[in-house]
Image (cartoon, helix red, strand yellow):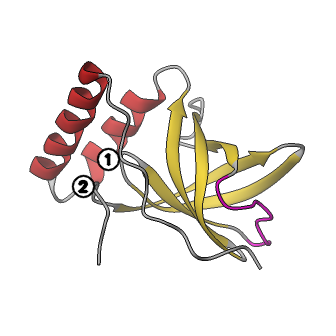
Amino acid sequence: MNQRRFHRVKHTAPGELKHHDMKYRCRIENISLRGALISADECLMVPLNESCTLSIEVAPGQAPMVVTVGVVHCFFSMMGVKFIAFEGNAEQTLLELIRRITTEPEKLAQEWESIQQEKAGGKQPTPAEPSVAHCN
C-alpha cells in the first residue's frame, strides 16, 4: 500500500548529510515536497527517527538548499528522509526545483496548496509511513 501524500520526481544532485559530528557525501536520487531518497558510496550510520541536516546542491555556484530531515528508512547506503524544517527560503527553492522537473504540475499545485492549508490551520503534517528497516 502506497501511503505517500506527495509525488516524487527523479532528481539526481550532490549533497551532504550531517549527523552530530559525522558528515557524509551523498546524492539525492528522488525528491518530493516533503522528503527525499538519498544514496552514498559508504554506509550511512544514522539511526531511524534521528534528525540530520541535509544540504542539497541546487545549481553550481548557488548556495545549497539546507533542510533538517528525519530518517524514516535506512539500509546500508540508501536512506529515506522526511523534511522537518527548512532554512531561509529553502522550501520555496524546493518548490521551484520540483516545478521545473515534474511531469505532474497539477498534482504539485494541489500538494503545495495542502501544505499551505496545513500551515494556515496550524495542523502538523501527517507522519511519514512507519518504518521497519534499520541501518546495517
Q: Secondary structure at mark 1?
A: helix
Look at label 1 and name its amino acid: Ile
Residue occupied by mark 2: 102
Kindly report the secondary structure that dominates the magenta region of the rendered protein. loop
What's the distance in space between the residues labelled 2 and 1, CA to CA? 6 Å
Is 62 included in the stretch rendered in magenta?
no
Residue appearing at x 37%, y 28% in the figure: 92
| Type of amino acid under label 2 | Thr
Span highlighted in magenta in the image: 41-49
51 to the left or right of 9: right
Q: What crowding class fits label 2: few (fewer than 14 Cα within 10 Å), some (14-19), or many (20 or more)?
A: some
Q: Is residue 90 visible?
A: yes
Query: In the displayed structure, would residue 86 be above or below residue 57?
Result: above
Neighbourhood count class around disc 1 (C-alpha, 10 Å): few under 14, some 14–19, many 20 upward: many
Q: Is residue 23 left or right of residue 93?
A: right
Foreground of the two, 108 or 45: 45
Tell me which corner region of the image, top left, top right, bottom left or bottom right, holds residue 60: top right
Tag of residue 98 = 1
